[in-house]
Image (cartoon, rainbow, N blue to C red):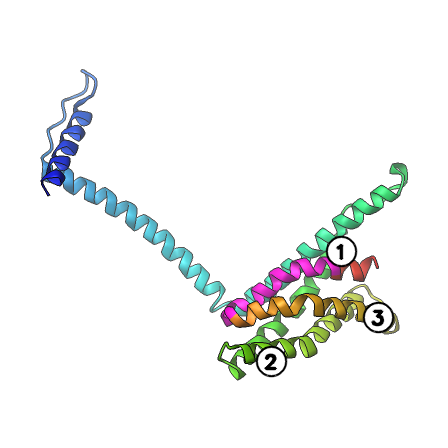
Amino acid sequence: MFARIAYRRSLVLLTQRCLLNVSPNTKKLPQLSSQQLTLFQFRQFYQKRSESSTDATITRNIWNKIFGKYLLATNILSSGILMVIGDLVAQEIEYRRHHNELDEFDIKQERYDTKRVFRMFVVGCLQGPLHHYVYKWMDYAMPVRNVKNTLWKILIDQIFMSPACILIFFYSACYLEQRSVQDTNKELCDKFPIIYLMDWAMWPAAQYINFRYLDTKYRVMFVNVCTAVYNIFLSYMKHDY
């Protein structure tokens, strides 16, 4: 206790010396009492704490709105944006491979196809509502996050959701490319087995983490982050396979 009192007095004396250490032309500042300095320090500390608390409150309110009131819009936009990220990576890989295969003077290909990027954004946004409502229904029907319910959710996701997402991807992308239904069906029949096999190889492990440990409001965002990697393969299968 006495050590604390001595430390506080030394701090007060040091502060007073700093305040009085000014140029001769400056008016001499009045000496502050120990209580005044303590009150001043408390006000400074409280002001900084209030500012940091306000910033944290604003961030928390924004976060709660994104994953609360505007969850559907968040899931739709994140699906489109992360689909675009995966497609841009796929386009970069395609460009570099073609650049190595072709002579420099023969290259007329642009690095990124903006129309394709837009199509992938639309395709991703179309998948957002499906994930949003199906995951909400799963958690409503099986609210307990145990191993049994998790395995059931993974099975539902692989048997119903995965084929549905693949169909949405191909039919919406081909429609935006103004291709006929016959061409779309042929492409889908050729590529569906490989894509679905890859889907079984990747998604059960990721969805176990999703359904077992995450809250409902974070499920679609988690899937979209994983899909950003998966979409590199999916975009390659659609455009360059």
Magenta span includes 231: yes
Tell me: residue 112, above or below residue 200.
Answer: above
Residue 152: which disc? Answer: 2
- Residue that mark 1 sits on: 115
Q: Main secondary structure of the magenta part?
A: helix
Per the model, the C-alpha gap separating discs 3 and 1 is 19 Å
The residue type indicated by label 1 comes to Lys
Q: Is residue 109 visible?
A: no
Q: Which comes sooner in the sequence, label 3 or label 2?
A: 2
**Viewer-closest of 175 and 16:** 16
Q: Residue at x 49, y 63 (%)?
A: 66
How many residues crowd around disc 1 within 10 Å: few (fewer than 14), some, or many (20 or more)?
A: few
Q: Nearer the viewer, mark 3 or mark 1?
A: 3
Q: For the residue labelled by badge 3, is the local secondary structure a helix, a strand or a loop?
A: helix
Judging depth in this view, the residue of 222 and 35 nearest the camera is 222
Residue picked out by circle 3: 184
N-terminal of the pair, mark 2 or mark 1, is 1
Residue 239 magenta-drawn? no
Residue 178: where, in percent of width, then height? Answer: 83, 66
Kind of residue sitting beneath label 2: Trp
Helix, strand or loop at disc 1?
Answer: helix
Marks 3 and 2 sit apart, C-alpha to C-alpha, by 32 Å
Which residue appears at 58% of the width and 67% of the height? 220
Per the rendered image, the range of residues in magenta is 213-233
Q: Are marks 2 and 1 in contact (CB under 8 Å)?
A: no
